[in-house]
Amino acid sequence: MSNKVKIGIVGGAGYTGGELLRILINHPHAEINFVLSKSHAGQAVSHVHADLLGETALNFSTQLNQDVDVLFLCVGHGEAKTFVQENSIDPKIKVIDLSQDFRLKGHGQLPKINNQEVVYGLPEINREAIKSAQHIANPGCFATCIQLGLLPLAQAGLLDKVHTTGITGSTGAGQSLSTSSHFSWRANNIQAYKTLNHQHLGEIMQSIRQVNPANASKEQVIHFIPWRGDFTRGIFVSSSLYCEWSQEDLEQLFEDFYADHPFTHLGKDPIFLKQVVNTNKCIIQIEKVGTQLVVHSIIDNLLKGASGQAVQNMNLMMGIDECDGLKLKAGYF
């Protein structure tokens, strides 16, 4: 691609905005035109994101600049829809929303921006739709990790009464401080929250029904307990269910499902969080005892669970190599 993709970022002061900036500053085909943050207007981006000192001379702006090809919305849940409603976004601009505002279908219909459909941006099941999409709803972090561990089973009709636990780092709660995000609370501490009622369950079930219409008649089959962990980045999910298939057949099922997807991999050895932190990867491991199957899946919540996947979607939308800007080494040590 000869010309660079002109980028605008709305809400660039938070964790996802910072990671998006870090990726796009070093992306071979991207040029950041503006980063909007009303709370930090006029300040240097590197003042808020100190890791970008020496990397960019950008300052935060207060105005929406329509001279862009792609607009990333890194605002809070509920704020993206309001922003779209209050601003006349040029229909030629492609929008990638990182909030949950446009993820769920209404009455079987895709949500819309500027009367244009918003495609759910999980490349492992929607790659072709993403390539031709005008707008994308980026999946949630827990939703991404859980779905990638379960979708091959869903397609094969093997899902029934799945019990899932998942633990996430403090960055999953965003930058705004609350009692449970202070270091003194998080350190040496874990807590279950939103038990059986997490907001990502709707989009998980939506994808499960998409890959196998036979699942449409099923009620909620995912019983999910999320946990707050005493670390900063990453999600580790374990899903258990009854399954009569052999370990070998299950591994083949997963390898076939993800054969053409560069960021999702099946690991044969026990997996651990440091394998994926600072990457756009999802790594999956299968364990089986008798008829009890456990599927482990891990991602970096800020990358494959947010900004990395958003850039992956941008690459697909703009006809760029899917992996450009995302060949990142894990923070292994």
Image: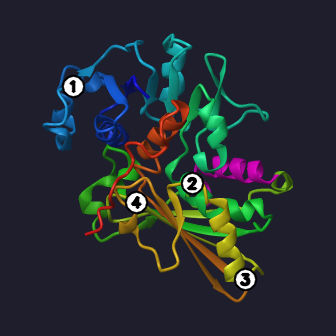
Comes first in the chain, label 2 or label 4: 4
Q: Residue furthest bottom?
A: 290
The range drawn in magenta is 196-212
Name which residue lies at 64% across and 34% down.
119
CB contact under 8 Å: marks 1 and 4: no
Comes first in the chain, label 3 or label 1: 1
Badge 3 is on which residue? Answer: 246
Spatial separation of the CA atoms under disc 3 and disc 2:
24 Å
| Disc 4 secondary structure class | loop
Mark 2 or 4: in front is 2
* Category of crowding for the residue at label 2, using alpha-carbon neighbours closer than 10 angstroms: few (below 14), some (14–19), many (at least 20): some
- Residue 255: image location, x then y, percent: 63, 67
Spatial separation of the CA atoms under disc 1 and disc 4:
28 Å
Badge 1 is on which residue? Answer: 58
Badge 4 is on which residue? Answer: 234
Instruction: Tell me the number on the disc at residue 261.
Output: 2
Give yes or no for residue 198 being in the magenta stretch. Answer: yes
Q: Amino acid at mark 1?
A: Leu
Comes first in the chain, label 3 or label 4: 4
Name which residue lies at 58% across and 40% down.
121
Magenta segment main secondary structure:
helix
Comes first in the chain, label 3 or label 2: 3
* Category of crowding for the residue at label 3, using alpha-carbon neighbours closer than 10 angstroms: few (below 14), some (14–19), many (at least 20): some
